[in-house]
Amino acid sequence: MPANAVKCEGRTSARIDSIMAIRPILIGNEIYRRLPHGPRHSLSVPRVSACMDLCRALGWLDDDEYRGSSPASLEQILTFHEPEYLDALQRIEVGETLTADEKVRFNIGVNGNPVFPEIFTRPATACGATLAATEIVETGGIVFSPAGGTHHGRPGRASGSCYLNDLAIGIGSLLTRGSQPILYLDIDAHHGDGVQDAFHDDDRVLTVSIHEAGRWPRTGEVEDCGGGFALNLPAPPGFNDSEMDAIMERVISPLAHSFAPEIILLQCGADGLRDDPMSKLDLSNNALWSVVSQVSEWSDRVIVFGGGGLIRGALPAPGPGYGRPSRVFQFRRDYRCRRKSFCGRSDGIDVRVAIHPNTGLQHSAMPPIWGWFGLKSKR
Ligand SMILES: [Zn+2]
């Protein structure tokens, strides 16, 4: 247990009500409409823009709840990443080709980290969103950055399709400004290795990762405590909603209340959902809603990140208590898709999204986090 853990038992329902009265903010950018990673990569999906469009179509996202983000500056990115690596990303973006040695050194163009046109600007924009989120929550608030959560990024190389580590940069910025302690909770199906290692031995940051046991990067075993300030809970295939609830109630919640974080960052990757083509976990949207709900009651300063997720056909569905959406949304973006509609069902509510027959939505795997925030803020 971190040495600076203190008791925090005074969170009253009145305080939680006041927290929920804060209007949440969603940070996005139009850059996410362009396909990343090339046409055949598993992450070549317009998931962030699809999430933004769908939330707007369902009436969940008002204009004053949305913020665009600028790319983080080189100086800000250099707080975590190495200059030679950033130089390589920028050279690729202007059309240069890396040497064979550089590809190996920076892990680019190999191992699932493809070269793509905005290989520096796009990740830098996600970093900018995370930094903007840290400034918003410093005075209290909830922010959702669906493009954030690139938890595998390393100082000097790409890893797991993560080129820059927006989380490490954001947490570092918070610490520099004196915000601590910070709880980082990661429920992506993959271990949050890059963030854990970035704050190894740092008693100001507690990193907690619930992930599928044995899945790439094959780290984060239960014995791994990150120098004393990390908790890893590898879950077996088939890990389901009730098991997530039990872990949250019996392990994570007591730990969070003991640590008493000033700010919480939640990497809420969607790849633990049942139909993800890679992971073997068995979570539903309800599990993600539940985690977001609980985390938002532990602190009045919360940032939630979209993280990973490869489900084709999943869509953000309304949170519990939402009325039946009356509108059918027709995507007009240049997404290629063979399907003409998506259907979802959650808590007895049916959702249908129609797809333009000639374009359509290729992929929308964003969890319905924003819907949950919208529910809390508007009722
Ligand atoms: Zn993942």
Image (spheres, rainbow, N blue to C red):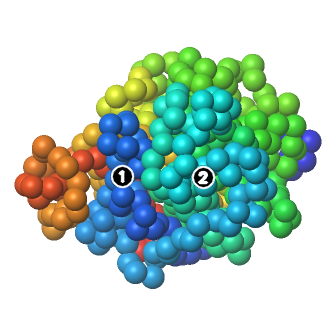
Secondary structure at numbered mark 1: loop
Residue placed at 57% from the left, 37% from the top? 108
At label 1, the amino acid type is: Leu
At label 2, the amino acid type is: Arg
Q: Is residue 294 left or right of residue 40?
A: right
Give the distance between the C-alpha atoms of the residues marked 1 and 2, in whole angstroms: 20 Å
Q: Is residue 8 left or right of residue 245?
A: right
Q: Nearer the viewer, mark 1 or mark 2?
A: 2
Residue 156 screen position, x and y as percent: 72, 40
Q: Nearer the viewer, residue 274 or 27?
A: 27
Residue placed at 36% from the left, 58% from the top? 34
Residue 320 screen position, x and y as percent: 35, 55
Residue placed at 80% from the left, 42% from the top? 199
The mark found on residue 62 in the picture is none
Residue 230 screen position, x and y as percent: 76, 34
- Image quadrant containing the N terminus: top right
Residue placed at 85% from the left, 49% from the top? 204
Q: Is residue 284 left or right of residue 152?
A: left
Q: Nearer the viewer, residue 128 or 365?
A: 128
Residue located farthest toward the bottom when viewing the structure as drawn = 64
Secondary structure at numbered mark 2: helix
Residue 48 found in image quarter? bottom left
Q: Which residue is mark 2?
A: 91
The mark found on residue 35 in the picture is 1
